[in-house]
Image (spheres, rainbow, N blue to C red):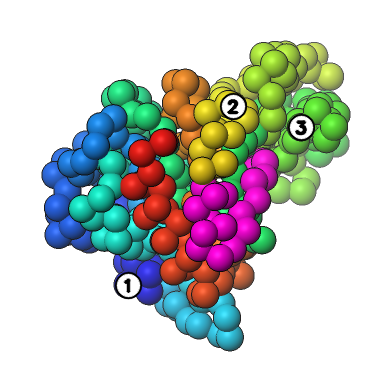
Amino acid sequence: MRELVEIESPTGETRALGERMTAELVALGGAVEWLGEHVRADFDGREPPLLLLGHLDTVWQRGTLGMRPFRVIGARAYGPGVCDMKAGLAIALAALRESAGARRAVRVFLAADEEDGSVSARTKLAEVARGTAAALVVEPSTPDGAVKTSRSGLARYRVQVDGSSGDADAHAASAVEELARQIVDLLTLEDPKAGVAVNVGTIDGGTRANAVAEHAEAMLDVRVAKQRDVLRVEAAVLARTPHDPATRVAVLEWYSRPPLERSEGAARLFTRARAHAHDLGFELREAHSVGGSDGNLVGALGIPVLDGLGAVGGGSHAPEEYVVVSSLEARAALLARLLQDPEL
């Protein structure tokens, strides 16, 4: 895990980590293929294959490791990408090693741009997933160790406003003011009971305090728990009408992932995982996550998905990201048993 953390792999710069994972997968007997910057590996065994999903990229820019190196303090290991998802990759390798000789056929797919929505990975992922019996995803668990049988869908939008420039005391249409009004409107779409969450992540606009802003934009993240609400929420986001008729408002969808709703197949996978965990001496719970993963994309293809099989930890995408070290061996043992399970 430490060695993988110390290979920095921000989205767009994952080649070195991909080469390390390729070497590990080949050493374990996998037939490895590069699909652009994404990695596929196939392991022989009882058919149909299980799909083992992970990703190579992290949200951390190169150089972050120098500021926050890998370290172990008490029961926790810290470092950029340690939880999401270098520990998950280490767990996957350990499980493949431990299950050798008795496992099902396994098809591994490691996306290079999952943190940016798997935009370039989607077509390849759909091809790799075809014919698999179930998908096991080594994203981190919840902080208390629960696996994930459902996830919210998400969409990213760029809200762009154009006005007209001029001095602060001139008659001009402010793009910043119009954007502020649009943001207030968009935040009213939040509905916690329905599982709809809206976050304005970035705002940019204007040049100086005494000039009317000609352009402004914001990045918007929208989470929706149920497929039935997706079109309604999407239509509401896109239906932007300017408050100031002298401005122009446009909304561009950057990417989206469909919701991963709990299915009968996911329930069956969880039942098997819980039984294996019990045999290993710990109790396993299931949970819903508002975050998306490549499991959302595979679930939309009708393939049962069990997510959150990676490390127990927390703080993903935050400076305090951590993994509970004592959990690693148990999580690898659980995944190894699932890879050998004839009932999956």
Secondary structure of residue under mark 3? loop
Q: Residue at x 41, y 47 (%)?
A: 338
Where is residue 203? Give x, y as percent: 68, 42
Q: Quadrant of residue 24?
A: bottom left
Q: Amino acid at mark 1?
A: Glu
Residue matched to label 3: 195
Secondary structure of residue under mark 2? loop
- What's the CA distance linking mark 2 and mark 1? 37 Å
- What's the CA distance linking mark 3 and mark 1? 38 Å
Residue 277 lies within the magenta run = yes
Residue sitting farthest toward the front = 279
Question: Few, some or many C-alpha atoms within 10 Å of disc 1 (few <14, some 14-19, many ≥20)?
Answer: few
Q: Nearer the viewer, mark 2 or mark 1?
A: 2
Residue matched to label 2: 263
- What's the CA distance linking mark 3 and mark 2? 17 Å
Q: Quadrant of residue 227?
A: top right
Identify which residue, 100 or 121, lies in the foreground. Answer: 100
Secondary structure of residue under mark 1? helix
Q: Nearer the viewer, mark 3 or mark 2?
A: 2
Question: Few, some or many C-alpha atoms within 10 Å of disc 3 (few <14, some 14-19, many ≥20)?
Answer: some
Residue matched to label 1: 3
Q: Amino acid at mark 3?
A: Gly
Above or below, comparing residue 306 to residue 128 in the picture: below
Quadrant where the N terminus is found in the figure: bottom left
Q: Are marks 3 and 1 in contact (CB under 8 Å)?
A: no
Mark 2 / mark 1, whichever is N-terminal: 1
Label drawn at residue 34? none
Above or below, comparing residue 248 to residue 267 in the picture: above
Point out the stretch of residues depicted in magenta. Answer: 273-291
Quadrant where the C terminus is found in the figure: top left
Mark 3 / mark 1, whichever is N-terminal: 1
